Amino acid sequence: MKQQVITFGCRLNTFESEVIRDAMAKSGDDNIIVFNTCAVTKEAERQARQAIRKARKNNPDAKIIVTGCSAQISPEKYAAMPEVTKIIGNSEKLESASYLDLSGSMRVQVNDIMSVTETASHMVSSFEGKVRAFVQVQNGCNHRCTFCIIPYGRGNSRSVPVGEVVAQVKKLVEAGYNEVVITGVDITDYGKDLPGAPTFGAMIKRLLTLVPELPRLRISSIDVAEIDEDLMRLIKYEPRIMPHVHISLQAGDDMVLKRMKRRHSRADVLRFVEEVRAVRPEVAFGADIIAGFPTETDEMFANTLNLVHEAGLQFLHVFPYSEREGTPAAKMPQVAGNIRKERAEKLRAAGDIELSKFLRNKINSTSQVIVEKDDYARASDFTSVRIKGQFELGNIIDVNIVGVEELELLGEII
């Protein structure tokens, strides 16, 4: 059996799964399956447990390791599963030593994540099955949003020094990657723990200067309350920054945002979107939104739903609110589960409407796309493009946009 890493959750987990793959390879044991879990919602944890049970049934002799945020926060849940060989924490999962003694007495190897004060730079030269590469620049979070359990899985914010980020990106470009995604837990909080306290924008500016051969840089989820001047200028005027901005929004009602302990307002989001779009009208916006947060009334929800249209948000990650034990929001008056699901569906439908409008406006335009599969590519604004022909994966090609089908563009090679 080939070693396997099964990933749940965020882009940072995707990056860390490649580090796990490298670390695990040094064990010399091919009979290992690692589950890199997520704790954002109860559903994510349920899916992980289900996958673990299925893996054990199909691989009765495999050594099954569980790690990631869910394992870090609730190691006892996985320790109670007879299918699991070992549970390791978010810090330990990146170390080769964690995969060497899998039959020893240390079945649960999870430290106090709050005691971790640095984030090491892990050089990853390739990403299995991916045409774009991920680079971690930051980990952890210093904020305590009332709904969020992730700081207890990731620890406090800590940043990777600029020089190490540059070295990682250079290595990936040399390996043939045309697009790099910058990722972390709270990337716009970058640098406060480093000497000189460089901002996230300053780090990106230096990265682009020192790696001029990098064609495309994509930035993952950002917080509009933390956008510095350098970052704003880069988003507006730097063509190598992809015109796709994903906002950590969560809600579009000021009272809900206050109860979430978010630091932006509804007006802040509208102002940011309008300012960027005025300079780069081709930009696409995405957002994370929680449906049915405790105390959310119909009127509060309507404000969030309307914001999707007012701001023109095309790519939505919508989650029905999920109670997380140990968070303040879990103790607030709850919205009924069926209402959460209904509101989530309405938000997804609103996002589809905005995406459909955005796609129709691209017909008869040209676009640079990166080839992801034989007949499938991704434009700089993250829209999906169907193409015909044989192209090397990861190549950037020019296409004419000739139509739209099921929320995907149809492209013809120029």
Image (tube, grey):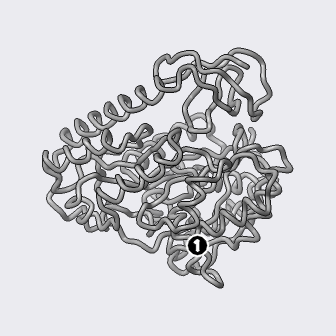
Report the quarter where the C terminus lies: top right
Give the image location of residue 27, x and y in percent.
79, 57
Residue visible at 28% across and 56% down in the picture: 323
* Side (left or right) of 389 relative to 48: right
Which residue is most to the bottom? 195
Question: Which of 354/400 is in front?
Answer: 400
Horizontally, residue 38 falls left or right of residue 366, namely left
Residue 395: quarter of image: top right
* Residue holding disc 1: 199
Residue 102 picture location, percent across and down = 68, 60
- Looking at the image, which residue is at 48% across and 70% down? 141
- Observer-nearest residue: 314 or 375? 314
Q: Residues within 10 Å of mark 1 (few under 14, many from 20)?
A: many
Residue at (26% x, 34% y) in the render:
346
The type of residue carrying mark 1 is Thr
In the rendered image, the vertical position of residue 279 relative to residue 385, given as above or below: below
* Outermost residue to the front: 278
How far across and how far down the image is residue 114, in percent?
Answer: 50, 78
Frontmost residue, 392 versus 303: 303
Image quadrant assignment for residue 319? top left
